[in-house]
Amino acid sequence: MPRNPLKSDLIPGGSSSGSAVAVAAGLVPLALGTDTAGSGRVPAMLNNIVGLKPSLGLISTYGVVPACRTLDCVSVFTLTVDDAFAALKALAGPDVKDAYSRAVPLGALGAVPAKFAVGVPAKGARVFFGDNAAAASYEAVLARLHGLGATIVEIDIEPFYETARLLYEGPWVAERLVTVRNLLASSPQSLHPVTREIVKSGAGISAADAFAAFYKLEDMRRVAAHMFRSIDVLVVPTAPQAYTVAQMQADPIQLNSRLGTYTNFTNLLDLCGLAVPASVAADKTPFGITLLAPAGQDAMLASIGRKFHADTRLMLGALTVPQPPLAVLSAEPAAGEIAIAVVGAHLSGMALNGQLRNLNVRFLETVRSAPDYRLYALANTEPAKPGMLRVAPGTGKQLEMELWALSVEAFGKFVADIPPPMAIGTVLLSDGRSIKGFLVEPEGLVGARDITAFGGWRAFVASEQKA
C-alpha cells in the first residue's frame, strides 16, 4: 500500500492508488489508472487531485487486465482538469483490437454558461455515514456551484443506489470471476483475501440471475436518462468519507463498500465522470466531488470542472504549489463546428436548452445583437418562446444572446427540427460578426407582444415570474 502524501495515516484509495499517489506527490504530471467501480475517482479525492473517468469505450482497454470487460475504463490522474482533458484527447479513439471500443464524440472545452442545472441527491438521501465534516463540505460545494451560476435541483438518488448494488450483488461479480478463475482454482492464496472472497461469490450466480439483473439495469438506465433531461450534470461526493489505514484494515469489506456509494453505479449506467478536489480540512483531510453526465459529455464535464476547481484555489495535490491560471478558451467555433446564436427558450437554463445539450454542443460566450432587431413574445406557444425580427438599422435594440458551437452533423439535425414560424438566418452581432441564429417569420407575430424593451428573453421571463 503506497503512503498517502497528503496525510500519512489516511488510505490513498484504490485500486489505482499508486498512480494517484505518484501524481499527488509531484513525481509525474500524469498517470493512468483503471476504473470499473470507482478506482479512478476515489484515489483522486483522497489525494487532492483530478480523476477523469471517460465514457465507456472512449479509450481502448486493449492490453488492460480486465476486472469487468463490459465496464472497465482507463482513467487519467492529473493535477488539473486541463491536463486531464489534454491527455484524454491524446488517448481517445476507437480501436479494432478492443471489442468494447466505440466511436464516442469527444468535443472540446468550452466556457461555462451563465446558467446551468446541477442535480444533487435530495437532503434526506445524502449518505456520509455520520461524517458531519464531509456533509458540511458538500453543502459548501453546492454554495460554490450556485455562485458559479448553477441552479441546484434535488433529484431522487435511490435508483442510482439501487443500480450500485447490482455491481457486487449481481452478475458482474461473476464477470470478475471469468478473469481469475484458473488462478483461483490453482493458487487461491496468491489473491488478496478480500479480493478472493468477493470474486468467489460470483460462482453461485446463474444465467437466470444474470438476465434478471440485465432487465433491471435497463429499467434503471431509462430512469437515469429521464432525470438527465432536466439537469446538465449530476454532482455527488466522490466518496462519503475518508478512512484511515487502521480503520480500513479493521473492516476492509464494509468500508470499501462504503467508498463506492457514489461511484459504483456510474459505469453500469453508461455515464462519464470527473472527480475534482473541493476542499482540504485543517487536519489535511481532503474532500472532493464527482461530476457525472451521460456518455459523450466528457468535454462538458471538463468545462464545468475546470471552472469549479479554479474557484477553490486549492494547492495542487500534496504540493505547496498553487493552481496555474486557467487557459483562455477561444470563443470561435473549432474546425468542423458551426456557431449558432440563440435568443429565447434555448438559452442556458431555459426550457429548450436540453435540445442543444443532447447534441453535445459547446458553449462559447454571451453576446449581444446589433441594434437592428426587435423581440416579441409569441402567442400560443408551448413552451413559451420569443421571436426576433430584423428591422431597419438602428430602430431596434441590442438583445442578449448566447453562442453555442455544434458539429456540422448536429447543426443539421438541430435545424431540421425547428418548427415554423421560427427560422435560422444570419444574425448580425454588436461587434460586427455575422452568425447563424434564430429569427422569426413576420406572419408569426400575429398576437405577439413586443418585449424589446427588456433587452432579452431572460430578463422578460424574470419580470413575468416576479409579477
Image (spheres, helix red, strand yellow):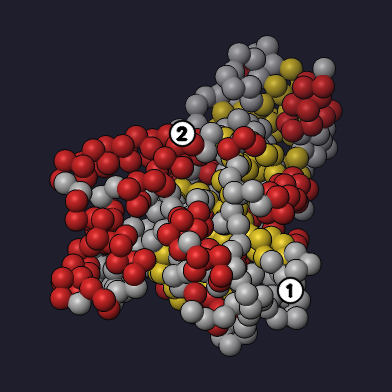
Mark 2, Cα crowd under 10 Å, few <14 / some 14-19 / many 20+, is few
**As displayed, is residue 280 above or below residue 362?**
below
Is residue 55 visible in this depiction of the protein? Answer: no
Disc 1 marks a residue whose amino acid type is Met
**Residue at image x 18%, y 67%?**
181
| Picture quadrant of residue 368 | top right
Residue 458 in percent (x, y) is at 74, 33
If you read the primary sequence from the N terminus, does the residue marked by circle 1 or circle 2 appear first?
Answer: 2
**As displayed, is residue 275 above or below residue 11?**
above
Q: Under tag 1, what secondary structure?
A: loop
Residue 99 in percent (x, y) is at 23, 63
Q: Under tag 2, what secondary structure?
A: helix
Mark 1, Cα crowd under 10 Å, few <14 / some 14-19 / many 20+, is some
Residue 113 or residue 120, whichever sits in front:
120
| Residue farthest toward the bottom in the current orientation of the protein | 27
**As displayed, is residue 418 above or below residue 275?**
above
Q: How many marks?
A: 2
> For mark 2, what is the residue?
226
> For mark 1, what is the residue?
315
Disc 2 marks a residue whose amino acid type is His
**Residue at image x 31%, y 37%?**
216
